[in-house]
Image (tube, rainbow, N blue to C red):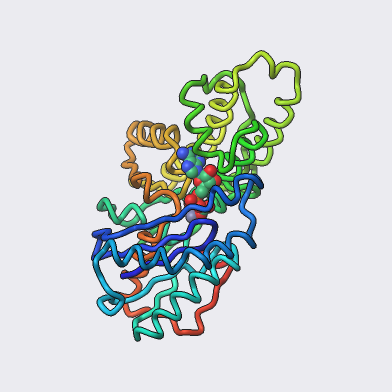
Amino acid sequence: MLGIETSCDDTAAAVLYGTDIRASIVSSQDHVHSCYGGVVPELASRHHMENVLPIVDQALAQAQVGLEQLDGIAVTYGPGLVGSLLVGVSVAKALAMAQQLPLIGVNHLEGHLLAVLLEQEVDFPFLCLLVSGGHTSLYLARDWGKYERLGVTRDDAAGEAFDKGAKMLGLAYPGGRIIDRLAQHGDPQAVRFPRAHLKTGKYDFSFSGLKTALRQFLSTPERGNYRDDDIVASYQEAIVDMLIANVLRAAADLNATRVVISGGVSANSRLRHRMLTEGAQSGIQVFVPSLKLCTDNAAMIAFAGAWRLAVGQRASLQLNASATLPL
Ligand code: KG4
Ligand code: ZN
């Protein structure tokens, strides 16, 4: 199965044989967008256009397969930036048509949700905390393709909270990884940032108050008394606290014994460590994908496409990009 992923700013292609990742290439555009402090959609789609075919060729070469040996082509068709999605969808349709191969449209969020199954056996049902730059949701995965959203962010995604916080602190884009690194030298209890407790939407998330609190804190004279590493560690701790609190509450309410974390923010070392230890203390088995499967990649798209193809699903050549595709 060939997977193609171009939903945001990473151009990715992967070749899977069952759960064996024969190739997974991710071409980052961080260098293109970093000077703007965020992804510029027009630039992202232009760079996808330049990169996508060389990246597909590279994946096929590394996997040592030709297009004619594939069983199908899976492509992310939403949600994401519409111009970016269109590049992947158009290329996948053209290749599928030229080679007479099945085409499978994949929801990017399902890719993240299932990614860990490429590496570990996880029985359904499980709770999945999906935390990325564009999404923050809690799902109950009952079975393949049967997902119930229990909670969602009311404002920013967790990754945005990391990236916008990093920007306020004068750090480069994307800031999540940088905050993670700096926080390892800081005291997470140094500054007490607020945690949102929502009255409605039991498992919903909100990060805008925290972001405002950081902005206000940075403009106070008090700020001078704190080391940057301590501020960063405290800010990260507030995000992680809010994420874990919701997951553990939902797990207790639903008697869930398995939790998966996924998406770019699941690469965060503090979230991974605390989720594993606090999950174990509550009798919950926590499954964490390896770092390469947390952030955007095409292996997870090929994997989600493979099970859909196995149950007979395929897209027509009318497949279109859908910026707000729900899961
Ligand atoms: O899943 P992803 O690669 O793309 C989206 O679908 O959004 O997630 C990207 C997000 C960015 O906001 C980035 O800052 C964040 O994941 N991220 C991290 C870490 N690595 C990536 N956030 C916190 N700690 C990390 N180690
Ligand atoms: Zn993603």
Seen at 65% across and 48% down, the residue is: 155
One can see residue 11 in this view: yes
Q: Is residue 254 left or right of residue 173?
A: left
Seen at 61% across and 23% down, the residue is: 192
Seen at 57% across and 18% down, the residue is: 190
The x, y position of residue 83, in whole percent, is: 60, 68
In the displayed structure, would residue 302 be above or below residue 35? below
In the displayed structure, would residue 267 be above or below residue 7? above
The x, y position of residue 200, in whole percent, is: 63, 47
The x, y position of residue 232, in whole percent, is: 57, 27
Count of residue discs? 0
Seen at 51% across and 65% down, the residue is: 50
Q: Quadrant of residue 62?
A: bottom left
In the displayed structure, would residue 263 be above or below residue 11? above
One can see residue 151 in this view: no
In depth, the one of 95 and 236 nearer the eye is 95
The image quadrant where one finds the N terminus is bottom left
In depth, the one of 49 and 41 nearer the eye is 49
Please, which residue is most extreme toward the top here? 225
In the displayed structure, would residue 168 be above or below residue 28? above
In depth, the one of 59 and 118 nearer the eye is 59
In depth, the one of 298 and 45 nearer the eye is 45
